[in-house]
């Protein structure tokens, strides 16, 4: 019996992994590709290559580092394609950025987990305020009007919340590093 071709195999395992790692992979690509439009193009090209090569993926290993290798090469292709632009990193610079990203990924993951835990400690009203500000298109002025307060008061409240979260994240990260 012949091996299933990429178009005839069950896409579920691939889709689960690509959805799970979409954000960290896009962050990696954005660290290599300065323009958002170019990064999205690299993301799409990477996703296609990952699908085509998915049969070669060793499921005993981690998906993200494997996927990042393909994203790196797709980023290089994109760099060559737009080499006429002024804002293009050299291949050496891209390699340095990729290596730096790899070494900082664990730290970024710890900070992300700490932030989630810290947000769980906030009062519901504070959490709702943060979500209104950062998960929607609403402006500070519109939000202040809805909350019957001034924009200045709202900025101060948001600053205090960000400071509180930053301190909490630093404490939690320091605890995990000890």
Image (tube, rainbow, N blue to C red):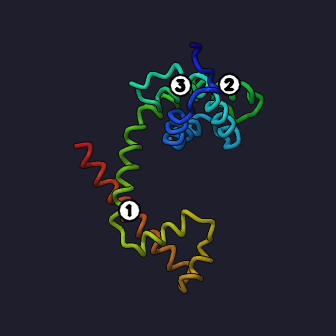
Asked if the residue at tag 3 contacts the one at tag 1, i.e. Cβ–Cβ closer than 8 Å, the answer is: no
Q: Earlier in the sequence, mark 1 or mark 2?
A: 2
From this view, report whether residue 171 is shown above or below residue 24: below
Nearer the observer, 60 or 42 = 60
User: What residue did someone put label 3 on?
Assistant: 69
Residue 24 position within the rendered picture, expressed as x and y whole percent measured from the top left? 50, 41
The CA span between labels 1 and 3 is 33 Å
Horizontal side of 113 relative to 95 (left or right) equals left
Task: Work out how far the residue at label 3 is from the one at label 2, CA to CA, in angstroms.
Answer: 13 Å
Q: Residue at x 38, y 56 (%)?
A: 116
Residue with the mark numbered 1:
119
Who is closer to the viewer here, 20 or 110?
20
Q: Earlier in the sequence, mark 3 or mark 2?
A: 3
Assign a secondary structure to mark 3. helix
Residue found at x 65% / y 38%:
39
Residue 52 image offset from top left, x and y in percent: 61, 24
Question: With respect to residue 63, does 130 lie above or below?
Answer: below
Residue located beneath label 2 in the image:
77
Residue 150 percent across, percent down from the top left = 55, 83
Give the vertical position of 63 relative to 24 (above or below): above
Percent across and percent down for residue 55 are 53, 21
């Amino acid at each position: 019996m012949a091996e299933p071709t990429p178009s005839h195999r069950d896409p579920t395992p691939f889709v689960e992994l690509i959805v799970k790692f979409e954000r960290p992979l896009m962050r990696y690509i954005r660290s290599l590709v300065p323009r958002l439009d170019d990064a999205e193009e690299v993301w799409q090209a990477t996703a296609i290559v990952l699908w085509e090569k998915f049969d070669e993926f060793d499921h005993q290993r981690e998906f993200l580092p494997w996927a990042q290798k393909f994203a790196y090469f797709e980023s290089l292709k994109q760099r060559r394609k737009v080499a006429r632009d002024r804002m293009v990193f050299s291949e050496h610079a891209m390699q340095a950025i990729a290596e730096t990203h790899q070494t900082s990924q664990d730290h970024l993951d710890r900070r992300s987990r700490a932030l989630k835990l810290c947000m769980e400690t906030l009062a519901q009203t504070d959490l709702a305020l943060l979500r209104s500000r950062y998960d929607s298109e609403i402006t500070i002025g519109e939000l202040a009007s809805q909350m019957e307060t001034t924009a200045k008061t709202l900025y101060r409240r948001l600053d205090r919340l960000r400071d509180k979260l930053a301190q909490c994240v630093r404490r939690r990260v320091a605890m995990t590093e000890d």
